[in-house]
Image (cartoon, rainbow, N blue to C red):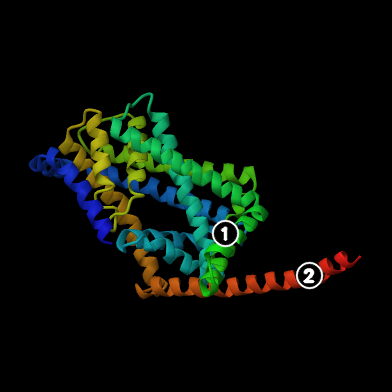
Amino acid sequence: MALGVFVSALFIYWALPGLHLPTVVEALQTANYGWLFPGVAVYMIGLWVRTWRWQYILRPVKQVSVKTLFPMVCIGYFGNNVFPFRAGELLRSYVLKRRTDIAITTSLATVIIERVTDGLVMLLFVFLALPFAPMPPFFRNVVVMTTVLFSLATLLFIWMAIQPERVERFYAILASVVLRGRLRQRVDGLYARFMLGLRSLRHPSDVIMIFFTSVLIWLLETVKYWFVMHAFDFSVSFVVLMLMNGLVNLATTLPAAPGYIGTFDTPGIKTLEAFGVNASIAASYTFTLHAALWAPVTLLGGYYFWREHLRLGDIEAAQRQAEAVALQDGALKQETSTESSAQKAPAQRREFTL
């Protein structure tokens, strides 16, 4: 939490020197907020597509309707926007467990797939925009570094999904050296559930579908950026807004205060400023855009949070539940492994005798 607040404060400090607060206030007062309504409508369509993507990723584990999953996605956004540590991801997995009996660790594996795919799409947006909208050197270096990280993570997850037997052998060797006792049981259970959540990456057609829906999600969000821009007295191309969207959402992967304070706003202001937009106008637009992205889904998620009778203590309950299931799965895995070894031993002795 302290790290997140520090990072947010650092980003805000980076943005403040170039701002003229009276101009920011004047731009906010004269903005045409009617443009927010079509922007919010498009964003809600994107939220439905996001739910559809999650349903598709969960399909190899269990078939769950989009109608059932939509409130959970909203609860996830509510948790990320209000609570620290991105608790929303754990909350939606907890509600999914209550509704469908899908293990929390398995659900979290599908969430990680979402995040990695989102990161790759953000990088795609940035690279597509580069020929038309050159970036400052600092942003370019960050993009190169994150491209390497997200690409490696994607290749690793796909390899794990396609070659589970090899992953199992590698994990068994590593775990036997590093892990002992109760910790081994817990990690064994987490590993088993996590591998189950990666099943949607086994087939190229599924990977393509997940990537396609991710591109659609972020294009719809960029359309919202475009609608909100019309509320203010400046104009940039849709490609620049794609670049802004990519950089802003890559920055929000950093630890930050709840609601991505600072990590969303400063990259947005600096990107627009690099393309000739007055810093104060860029700030008023970015602050409004941030609020328009934050408020509707947070209010909707808060309603579903209340309807599910959830409390802050349910985050800890979800953690305890995930650990308990992991311990149970780990003990079962070790017991099965021991029985398998015992069954193989007589056959090996007989072969030696013959």
- Examine the image and state in which quarter residue 276 appears: top left
The residue tagged 2 is 345
Determine the CA span between mark 2 and mark 1. 23 Å
Question: In this orientation, which residue lies closer to the viewer: 315 or 301?
Answer: 315
- Examine the image and state in which quarter residue 237 appears: top left
The answer to whether residue 50 shows anywhere in this view is yes
Residue at the spot 56% in from the left edge and 53% down from the top edge: 57
* Rendered-image quadrant of the C terminus: bottom right
Q: Is residue 233 left or right of residue 308?
A: left
Label 2 Cα neighbours within 10 Å, binned few <14 / some 14-19 / many ≥20: few
Give the SS element for disc 1.
helix
Q: Is residue 224 above or below residue 312?
A: above
Q: Is residue 268 left or right of residue 209?
A: left
The answer to whether residue 219 shows anywhere in this view is no
Residue 174, numbered circle: 1
Q: Is residue 104 left or right of residue 252?
A: right
Identify which amino acid the numbered label 2 is placed on. Answer: Ala
Q: Is residue 148 above or below residue 44?
A: above
Label 1 Cα neighbours within 10 Å, binned few <14 / some 14-19 / many ≥20: few
Residue 195, percent across and down? Answer: 59, 58
